[in-house]
Image (spheres, grey):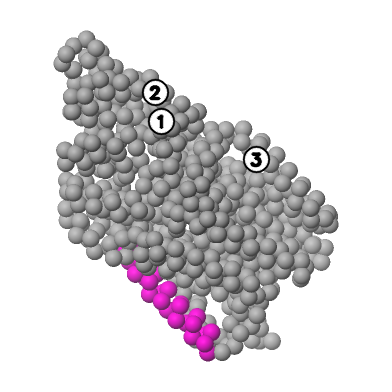
Amino acid sequence: MIEEKRHLLTSLLICCILCCITLFVYSHRFVNVEVTPKWMGLLLSVGATGVAWGIFSRKINFPSMPVFSVLTGCFLLVFIRDWVTLGFNPALLTFLCGLVLLFFVIQQIAARCTPKYLFGAIIVFAVATSLHGIIQYAVAIHVGKGNFSVTGSFDNPAGFAAALACVLPLCFYFFNDAIKKYFRYVAMIAAGIIAIAVFLSGSRAGMIASAVATAGWLIAKSKINGKKSALILAVIMLALSVVLYFFKKDSANGRLLIWRSTLDMVSDKPVIGHGQGAFQAKYMLYQADYFKTHPESPFAQFADNTLFPFNEYLLVLSEHGIAGLSMVFLLAFLLIRAYRHNRSNEGLVALTSLLALSVFSFFSYPFNYPFTWVLLFLNIAITGNVKHQKGWIHRASVFLISSVLLAYTSILIYAETRWNHIARRSMAGQTHKVLPEYDKLHRWLGKNGLFLYNHAAELNEAKEFEKSNVVFERCTRYFNDIDVQMLLADNYRELGRYDETERHLKTAAAMCPTRFMPLYKLVKLYETASRREEALATAHIIVNKDVKIPSSTVTAIKNEMRQLIEAIETSDIPVKDNRTSKELQNEDTRQGETPKVRPNGAALPP
């Protein structure tokens, strides 16, 4: 009895630590202040727990073999495909080992601690997160902030809303008549606070996921048969999607553009996909191709840099094809079958939480955040069956993997924090001094697209254009967007290779048709090359282009282009506005060097 209580308290403590880290941790020592510290903290805590359990635990708890096999197959598919395509990636291996160990740790927790305690602990942290968001909203009203004011400790409302929408169904566990009335009232209040926070975040994905999950739980309680319940949920989801489409129509159209271009990626490699991380490396090129073939598309005004497809299923399809998505659906089938074979209130709540997660995944990127993985594995552990395994082989395997994870995570933490430090030193004017430090970090961050982009930008600032292009060549295997294309064009312009400069500027202009700077630099290139007719035609495009976001830069560009048009049409010697050109060059200086990573999906509201 004493040992059982000790196991329960230990498991509950670990659960609380995981929730605290993945919901609240952030650090300015990292390039990405909000997301990377959460992942690193999770990997460290999981590794330490695995080492302790590998040494002291006598029993290792695993899920039923089909579920374990599917999850293992998914991780192996990701790692092997990436290794074959791009070579060994220690950061990806660390991440996948961390997920495997997280799965193991959650299995131990679920086997040693009853669901009501786990649900209760998670709800407490979710309420704290909700109150944090509500306070942010109140402060935003007071100081007059605009959108994206409610994010909790996340970088974007998507992470905040995803966490709360998936926790909301856990409150339903305490709505049972078998639960004491006091706890039912507390759970109702908690559910209300969480729902209010989701609404205030403005996340349409969070609102739809919360509503569909609530409807799913009510339908399950009413004992409507499976086909009818699925139809009702589909109708609710479709109706809410239509209503919320008109709530933020421009943002929704932006997502439609992204989905349409992502499907072009899928059509090129439908079976096995383009490989892990291919979306950030290739998507913007597909978007550029779309606008090159559809220059009059009404979607042009909604185009911007895109890091995620705002749909996890399309992400899996584009990177791992039908093979990868089939494994996801197989896992869902196995979990539903496991619940039907062993129906329980906690199993129903776990499935409802998974329903919220699956609906949210249709419209956003919840798996970019570690708390989502914690909830996913917890729901799998509660829904599936658990087997107890004894023996030194299992313990030794857990200990070995955990030790490797701790070592690699510690190295990655050092590399990430070092990168942040030298990037800020460079921004303070010490670019030449820190360039050797960038070279040293390639061993650990050499397959991080944002790191490579930052390094190439620093080399550009140091006027080492050839070296910058070499780094950019590697960068485009992992990350490629309009900023990459603009800096490549600048490198080639400084090297006097104008054909390559023109190609990259045209690609940048096609990626984001609303941007003025690529076209402006094309005009400057044509002037340098004495291509007057092309300069005049491009200047007319700039003058007639609609302005998406007014700014002094855009105003200066348009004014200069009007003067250029007048000069070319009335004189053989164009007159240059040197003051405006210099101002624009200064404003565009050190592009992309800042170590602060853009918020995920910053092109679109949630």
Q: Which mark is residue 545?
A: 2
Residue 182 belongs to the span the image colors magenta: no
Q: Position of residue 54 (x, y in %)?
A: 51, 83
Q: Which mark is residue 514?
A: 1
Where disc 3 sits, the SS reads: helix
| Residue shown at 50% from the left, 80% from the top | 398
Q: Are marks 2 and 1 in contact (CB under 8 Å)?
A: yes
Question: Upstream in the sequence, badge 1 or badge 3?
Answer: 3
Q: Position of residue 468 (x, y in %)?
A: 22, 50
Magenta-colored span: 392-416
Q: Position of residue 575 (x, y in %)?
A: 18, 17
Where disc 1 sits, the SS reads: loop
Q: Amino acid under label 1? A: Thr
| Separation (CA) of disc 2 from disc 3 | 32 Å
Mark 3 Cα shell of 10 Å, populated few (<14), some (14-19), many (≥20): some
Q: Can residue 385 be seen by looking at this rendering?
A: yes
As rendered, which of 39 and 469 lies closer to the eye?
469
Q: Amino acid under label 2? A: Lys
